[in-house]
Amino acid sequence: MTETAQRGRRSRRELPPPLPPETRTVGQLVAEAVRFYGSRFWPSLALGIPPAILTVAVAPLNRIEALLLVVTAGALLVTASYVAACALVAGRRPGSLPLAFATGVLVFAPAPVLATAFVLPAIAWLALLGFAVPAVLLEERGFRFAFRRGIELARADYVHALGSLATLVIVVFLCQGVLFFVLRGAGEAAIAVAGFLASLVISPLLFLGSALLYYDQAARVRSSKCDGALPRGKPASPGPVRHPSSR
């Protein structure tokens, strides 16, 4: 093998180091979500089971029935995946799972209603209040103070939070659509099966990226303070999540 070919192979293996959370861009966040998905594939894939079930359940319903299902059972399923993603990314024993789950259901339930006219209001809502869930789970905040902390995290860089969530939604939507049509065309699978598999494989990126976004916002809150100190008793950010091959 020539020296040029060896240098080419080395450059492909050696990925650039991830940016720290306080300066991480939207593109870097998506890349880190993909890296984490690859490094913890099976636990991450399990995050797609609840939304995949919801996709199959919603498919035969009309618009009103689908909205009612998503607001009720959908809130439970999607929250379960998000809470599990936060715990998985943290890599440690989380705080109160029931309280985090209840917080997530309250946050997510209005989102489908807001998305009926246009999806952006729903994303804006989640970008503002969604951080209350990791505030309960990872910082062990009470129910009332979790929403205060969630708003504080969102306001640290709301443009980054909103842009990141919007990008994740677009990426997941497009990738699911492509995979759905590929599965239908290649194997002549039923619509329900193709929809289930597409959601199962792609939707974990949305939850992993949202969980990583918490660390971006928490780092921005700390960097905005003069002393840069965390509140007493609160866990520090684990820093960028790296794929094992990049270490």
Image: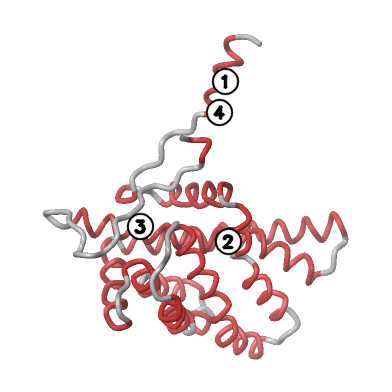
The image position of residue 150, as x and y in percent, is 31, 72
Q: What SS does tag 1 mark?
A: helix
Q: CA distance from mark 2 to mark 1?
A: 32 Å
Q: Which residue is mark 1?
A: 8
Query: Label 2 neighbourhood size at 10 Å, few (<14), some (14-19), many (20+)?
Result: many
Give the amino acid at mark 3: Tyr
What is the distance, in whole Å, between disc 4 and disc 3 at their CAs? 28 Å
Residue picked out by circle 3: 215
- For label 3, count other residues whose C-alpha is less than 10 Å away and answer few (under 14), some (14-19) or many (20+): many
Residue annotated with mark 2: 204
Residue at the image point whose x is 45% and y is 48% from the top: 27
Mark 3 / mark 2, whichever is N-terminal: 2
Q: CA distance from mark 4 to mark 1?
A: 6 Å
Q: Are marks 3 and 2 in contact (CB under 8 Å)?
A: no
Residue furthest front in the image: 93
Marks 4 and 1 in Cβ contact (< 8 Å): yes
Q: Which mark is residue 12?
A: 4
Marks 4 and 3 close (CB-CB < 8 Å): no
What amino acid type should be assigned to the residue bearing mark 1? Gly
